[in-house]
Image: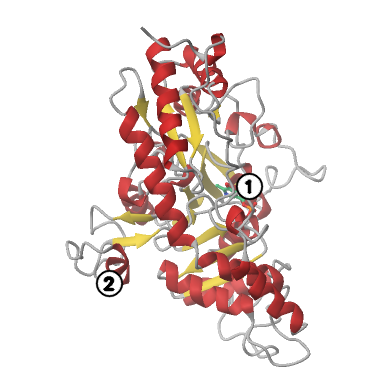
Amino acid sequence: MNEKLAIDGGPKAKTTKTIPMYPGGMEIGDEERKEVLEVLDRKYLFRYYGPEDFPSKVRQLELDFADLIGTKHALAVNSCTSALISSLVAVGVGPGDEVLVPGYTFFASAASILGAKAIPIIVEVDDSLTIDPRDMEAKITDKTKAVIAVHMRGAPCDLDSIMAIAKKHGIKVIEDVAQACGGTYRMRNADCGMRIENPGEGTKDLNSELRNPKSQIRRLGGFGDINAFSLQYHKIITSGEGGIVTTNDPMLYDRAQAYHDTAACWRPDRYGLPRYEGEVFPGVNFRMSELTGAVALAQVRKLDGLLARMRANKKRIKDQISDLPGLTFRRLNDPEGDTAITLVMFMPDSSITARFSEALQAEGIGAECIFDKGIPDWHVYAHWKHIIEKVSATSEGCPYTCPFYGKEVEYSQDMCPNTLAYLSRSIQIDIPPQMTDDDCDMIAKGVRKVAGAML
Ligand SMILES: Cc1ncc(COP(=O)(O)O)c(C=O)c1O
């Protein structure tokens, strides 16, 4: 006989406290303290100068991060939104351009396009809850300049297809790695616009494979033309706020650097003439402070440990619930590369999602419905009111009315029906690295209990 559900007055399956989902934030400790105190003790709070010579923490972060991701360049900025805007500006996105963005991502991915004065074009996600390559290709027009490929909820999007379509149509790829720092992707196909010298090679050890230039596996943020990471508090590693741009293209790096620093104030030859057209132009101030850099530097060293713990926890839960009839999981484009920050389960149909999620919560499990029409959530395009209604900061209505655009873009709450259909069947459970085996087993037990009674 089924055990009485907690929602109906039965005992809870999970009796331990829910651990907050701040993977790196919950690990802030002596390493971060040491780095920050060095900055304070030296009174060296600005990356480009201080009272005495001292190696910049922000610069060291950039070097370590480029090494981690395997790109030639990394540029530290003050948020992922800033990283996205700098990347869009770097690739030349501006008035009159369209940029593709999935309908399931945080609002910032779409808002950054408006920040670069271009028009967001909202694209369906598929059963991986990342951008649907078929809809992406269908929405390319002669105005399309770039796609923001979001590795949503920690899992890689279909980079093989995205890179191949972008190459075919001559558009730029910007990976949004805000939620998937440290994740990887193994290319299935060498002919996808990537520089893979000898596909098929590689060793079993992930780190040596990542170091092998001939291997077809990379860290996320090492595939697109230029890519954006977040260090905001909810992310895998954090400095409270912060972001990083990665690229292999020296020109895109120069342009992102110029834009993030007012007037390229701190490029190597401060007052020198531009070395080529497009190198220097007026920008904004997205610079990272040394205090932020110090925390981020210590966090980068913790990344692989955090990933290993989240992956072990997710596997432990999933192994215990994968036989349940009626319950499926979101498809992973590369299971090995998933950062495992969350487990997304699909209900057989949307009518049961809210009740199933409430039953899990009653069992003591921090489960959430991903989409509910009546509950605002900035991660689902149907709730991006300011974009759907084409609201802008000034009455001229830019960029929607921009004469360089010369078209009318239309948005509506139901413009991506597949996205809403997948999301309305989805329940997610966060997987903090700090969970114990007991926490994981109790979550699995609770899911089994609720599924046994309701599916
Ligand atoms: C997918 C995605 N992109 C961009 C951002 C924006 O990051 P930030 O807060 O660092 O600007 C976030 C933050 O939640 C995000 O989840």
Amino acid type for the residue under numbered disc 2: Asn
295 with respect to 321 (left or right): right
Place of residue 292 in the rendered image (x, y in percent of width and height, measured from the top left)? 68, 67
292 with respect to 60 (left or right): right
Tell which tag, 1 or 2, sits nearer the viewer: 2
168 with respect to 29 (left or right): left
Q: Residue at x 64, y 82 (%)?
A: 56
36 with respect to 455 (left or right): right
Where residue 277 is drawn, which disc sits there? none
Place of residue 164 in the rendered image (x, y in percent of width and height, measured from the top left)? 32, 52
Can you say which quadrant of the picture contains the C terminus?
top left
Q: Is residue 334 visible?
A: no
Front residue of 147 and 27: 27
Is the residue at mark 1 in contact range of ligand 1, meaning its CB lies under 8 Å from it? Answer: yes
Seen in the picture, residue 76 relative to 121 is either above or below; the reply is below
The secondary element bearing badge 2 is classed as loop
Front residue of 252 and 213: 213
Seen in the picture, residue 120 relative to 421 is either above or below; the reply is below
Q: Is residue 77 visible?
A: yes
Front residue of 131 and 122: 131
Place of residue 370 in the rendered image (x, y in percent of width and height, measured from the top left)? 54, 29
Residue labelled with disc 2: 212
Who comes first in sequence, dot 1 or dot 2?
1
Q: Residue at x 40, y 57 (%)?
A: 170
Seen in the picture, residue 287 relative to 160 is either above or below; the reply is below
* Quadrant in which residue 408 is drawn: top right
Can you say which quadrant of the picture contains the N terminus?
top left
Residue labelled with disc 1: 108
Place of residue 8 in the rendered image (x, y in percent of width and height, measured from the top left)? 55, 9
Q: Residue at x 71, y 36 (%)?
A: 386
Marks 1 and 2 sit apart, C-alpha to C-alpha, by: 34 Å
